[in-house]
Amino acid sequence: MKTSFKKRAIKAIFFLLLGVLPSLLAQDPSVDLTSQIPVDKNVKIGTLKNGMKYYIRHNDRPEDRVELRLVVNAGSILEDPSQLGLAHFTEHMAFNGTKNFKKNEIVNYLQSIGVQFGADLNAYTSFDETVYILPIPTDDEKIVNQGLQILEDWAHNLTFEGEEIDKERGVVIEEWRLGQSGERRMLDKYLPVIYKDSRYAERLPIGTKENLETFPHEAIKRFYKDWYRPDLMAVVAVGDIDVAEMEAKIQKYFGRIPAAKSPKKREEFKVPDHSDTYVSVLADKEATFAQVRLYFKTDPEEETKASDYRDFLVERAFTGMLNKRLQELTREAEPPFVYASTSHGGTWARTKDAFQAFAVANEKDIKGGLQAMITELERVRRHGFTPGELKRYKLDLLKSYEVAYNERDKSESENYVDEYVNNFLEKEPIPGIEWEYNLAKEYVEGIGLDEVNALIEKWITKENRVVVITAPDKEGVVLPTEDEVKGVLNRIRILKVDPYEDEDFGESLMTTLPKPGSIVSEKTSEKMSKKMDGSEGDGLGITELDLSNGVKVFLKPTDFKNDEIVMTTWSPGGHSLASDADYQSASNAASLIDQGGIADYDITTLQKVLSGKSFGVTPFIRELSEGVQGSTTPADMETFFQLTNMYFTAPRKDEKAFQSFITKNKSILSNVMANPQYYFVDQVQRTLSNNNIRGGGFPTEADLDKIDLDKAFAFYQDRFSDVSDFTFFFVGAFKVDEIKPMLEQYIASLPASGRKDQWKDVSPRPPKAPLEKIVKKGVDQKSQVIMYWDTEQEFDRKQSYYLSSFGEVMTIKLVELLREEKGGVYGVGANANAENMPYDHYTFQVSFPCGPENVEELVTATLDELKKLQKEGVSDEDLKKIKEGQRRQLEVSLKDNSFWANTLRSYYYQGWDPEGILKAKERIETLTSKDMQEAAKKYIDPEKFIKLVLMPEGE
């Protein structure tokens, strides 16, 4: 549970009237704090005779899918000195030949049933575990059986053919290369400080390049034989399945794995305690930010009783309230740090927990950032938290459980899977949300300030304390010495530290409601009531409303989630209507409003006012449009609509928030160009836009200086002062008749004068191809390649789809060629895009990281594969793979509120007939090899492209 209850991210916030709690509790069974934390009755847990454990649960979100996991309680911590990196290498070999699937047959088979390599099919290796991830369809029993056969093969049937091992060396070394950076160089130095005299200090899962290049085949086979065994494994299956049938299948496939004979002991490796404070202060020329990390290491505590869960709630209150204070500090005009947070829970070492504090400091005052963090900890030690802070956090905490409980029958299978994986590996309790919700309702209100404040003495001690500071190595950055760091820690007890001031604030957003407008027309078109298969029925179920102020509203009620309503909007214009001189002010205007608060409330006060509410609203101004977007629970819908209304009628111009925005961004950007990857991205954007100021790339300090608050605020007001051409989309858990009064009160009442705007075409165009640009940056021997095509031709939706599908095929073929055959890359991707706004054009891009010595060979191989596909077309096998993947993705997307909101917005924004949404499946079914082949020939000229390459300095 050290990374379980503490690891679970349940979004906050709900307002539970305390007066109704007694009646609610009377309806639910009381939780005895002395009782054992139960196991969720909805999960079937068993152990096979060979020692393998299994977890099975029925859950039909998403439908016709099951999430499978093979969990191995073995990772890099178990490697001997000759096996560095081989726990992770073993994971790679699982995809390169088993008893029943030769070479790359696993990947090929899974792609043929719509499972994408990387996006769906995956695995990870950590210090203490290796987990294989396999989501598959369940609408065909043969597929389920094959999925279990794959898991069984991973468990004990890897073949480790010598040729495949040696081919995979290149892939793993490219993954190692990908991780090389200034941050990695510093990590290699401070990890042995955090875990001094522990095996964790010397067992990073990726291993060493030297060992990856030279290890004998016997070493990896020995690791597999020693640690891949039933008593160290579990199978997890959660999805749209019959539990009894799945249990029988697991017993069949995994029960036949022989039990280990004379197994090696699976040791737990301790991290020694220490009385001294360890300090590591490091700098690197490629470091991007100045970062301060504090670790106060503790031993993991047993969490088996209900009282332990209550203790966890107390811990959440402590870190939650402290993080809100730190967030307030980041909003100062001259903040001591750009970002800061704290947490308590697991670390990289399974045998050690820690209270951790992290901050991105201003590189000009790193010592000041450390001082500010320590001061906040000391403020809690001396004065504690306030009653107001605790009251608000309790509301937030209760809402988090309320939302999770309301969605208990709509939770995604992967959420349950993660819990069961942690239960097996770290004994995380899995009582189920019903039990957790009942306990929270009963005991959250009784949490007192004294017990929350007491945690500071338990967690923040002089023993087992580590401070790590990393920063850019450049002129003007002053690193504190180890003595100075210890001085800050030691002197804090004698400095004056005032109590936190919790200011009073209002309890509602609106004191006076706007005069409501009206709905002037309502219709549900015939096209909108057909099912996805084209038959009659309430399929799309979209209601179109015209409001009295000219706003159009499209409503789609769904039952995909019980507690979610998604909103998006659009209005033509965007910052394309700003002059070049005002571009920086206009393009940042929405961010400044968002961070400034609303009406009389600054952002900090606004968040306090909204305590106990679960929703979010964000204004945006993009190149061609502006609007607001967000989501809410049905219970908080009215407050959600009020805030939405106020982003139009009462935006706040906050000078302090503006100065904070500028200061933080200058701090973030001050050294970002020292990072080779960021520098390359910046150069790519500037090259492809011909250095146009609207072309992207990272803003410079000079760009930030051009942002004028008055101009930004005026531009925002202009874009949001007249809603005559706004369109709103709502998708989720609501009834049309129930949402109508909200629309009349808060949306139809928005100001309008009949103005109709149109965006302008100020979009930069790329340079003419062919063009090659070499960007030299960085000391590590690694490169990045981008091959880019841009073709101005008349936009056609079918051609756009064909080219996009060709990109999927190209990705499959390049993975086979550049990764599996040549071992030259870790990852590679091809993608296409087509636009008709602001101008008609098609783009196609291939990108991959590699060694500098392999750039030209891999570029040539990519072009050869492209020409081959253009000449010979897409094979039937590959056509089947991408069509099945698209079909499976469509099945999931059609049950997602955000997908519908964004798709509807796109259709209406483009002026397309919404009936096209109904034809998505038909479009997939009719896709042919020739369609993609012709699109590739039409829009991709192998001789005319822009080639951008990152190379190390000195190459």
Image (spheres, rainbow, N blue to C red):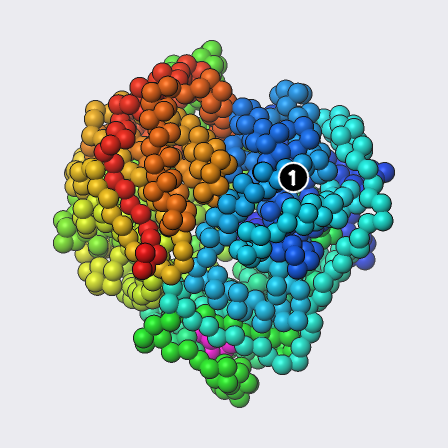
Name the amino acid type tagged 1: Phe
Q: Which residue is at a point 24% across and 47% down the rendered structure image?
A: 773
The answer to whether residue 2 shows anywhere in this view is: no
Indicate the secondary structure of the residue bearing disc 1: loop
**Magenta segment includes 370:** yes
Left or right: 622 in relation to 439 = left
Of 163 and 160, nearer the camera is: 163
Left or right: 178 in relation to 303 = left
Q: Is residue 472 above or below residue 572?
A: below
Position in image of residue 807 (x %, y %): 38, 30
Position in image of residue 646 (x %, y %): 33, 49
Q: Is residue 500 above or below residue 217?
A: below
Number of numbered discs overlaid on the protein picture: 1
The answer to whether residue 288 shows anywhere in this view is: yes
Characterize the magenta stretch by its predominant secondary structure: helix
Q: Which residue is at a point 31% across and 24% down the rendered structure image?
A: 936
From the image, tell me which residue sits under label 1. 160
Left or right: 572 in relation to 868 = left
Residue 79 location, quadrant: bottom right
Of 189 and 801, nearer the camera is: 189
Of 647 and 194, nearer the camera is: 194
Position in image of residue 910 (x %, y %): 28, 28
Disc 1 packing (10 Å; few <14; some 14–19; many ≥20): many
Q: Which residue is at a point 73% across and 38% down the rendered structure image?
A: 156
Q: Quadrant of the C terminus?
A: bottom left
Q: Which residues are drawn in magenta?
A: 369-376
